[in-house]
Structures are given as C-alpha cells and as structure tokens.
Image (cartoon, rainbow, N blue to C red):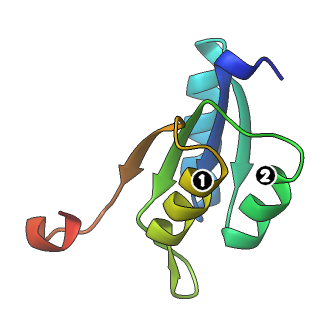
Amino acid sequence: MRPDRSLFIVEDDATFAKTLKRSFEKRDYDVVVCHDREALLSALETTVPAYAVVDLKLGAGGSGLECVKLLSARDASIRMVVLTGVASIATAV
C-alpha cells in the first residue's frame, strides 16, 4: 500500500462501503474497508492510512467517533471525513 494514497473506509453498510471503495479505487487510492471497530483495530496492526472516511453511527450501537479516536491516536496527521445519515443537524454536529 502506498502511504500517501492509503485510505480506510469505516462503514457498516456493505453496499455503500463497496460503492465508496470502487469510487476511491478509480481515483487511484489503496482502500481497506472496515465494517466495525474490531476490523479497524485489526487493519491498524499492519497499516496506518493517510486518509479515512468514517460513518458516524455504526451497527450494533457502534460509534464512528470511537473509530476517529483510534485513528487519531495511531497518527494525528490522518485526514478524516465523518459521514452521517442522521437527519438532525444538531446531532450531526
């Protein structure tokens, strides 16, 4: 994986994750998809990405904010985007 083009997608919706992965791969990113916190921890054992796209609300009560903390703790320079389908602006913020 090329460090400057590495991207983790943390998304529990398999179809959406697959769509995001294809889109980023077309733009020449090396993509790893993690569907939950445990998969993210496992992926971080071998690779620290330059970028991450993280879903705010993961299945089974999982929190994307916890994943953001894990990524930031591993490397504070990772550039991240947090996605949410939450309709409330106050909750999203």
Which numbered circle lies on residue 33? none
**Where on the picture, by quarter, is residue 3?**
top right
Within 10 angstroms of label 2, few (less than 14), some, or many (20 or more) residues? Answer: some
**Marks 2 and 1: CB-CB under 8 Å?**
yes
How many marks the image carries: the answer is 2
Q: Residue extending furthest right?
A: 46
Q: Residue 80: where, in percent of width, then height?
A: 45, 41
Q: How much space separates mark 2 and mark 1, taking CA atoms?
A: 8 Å
Pick the front one: 31 or 19: 31
Q: Label 2 sits on what residue type?
A: Leu
Q: Label 1 sits on what residue type?
A: Leu
Q: In this view, does 13 lie above or below 29?
A: below
Quadrant for the C terminus, please: bottom left
Dot 1: element: helix
Asked whether, in this view, residue 82 is left or right of residue 23, the answer is left
Tag 2 residue: 44
Which comes before the other along the chain, label 2 or label 1?
2
Q: Residue extending furthest bottom?
A: 61
Tag 1 residue: 71
Residue at left 71%, top 33%? 31
Residue at left 10%, top 65%? 89
Q: Residue 14: where, in percent of width, then height?
A: 64, 57
Dot 2: element: helix
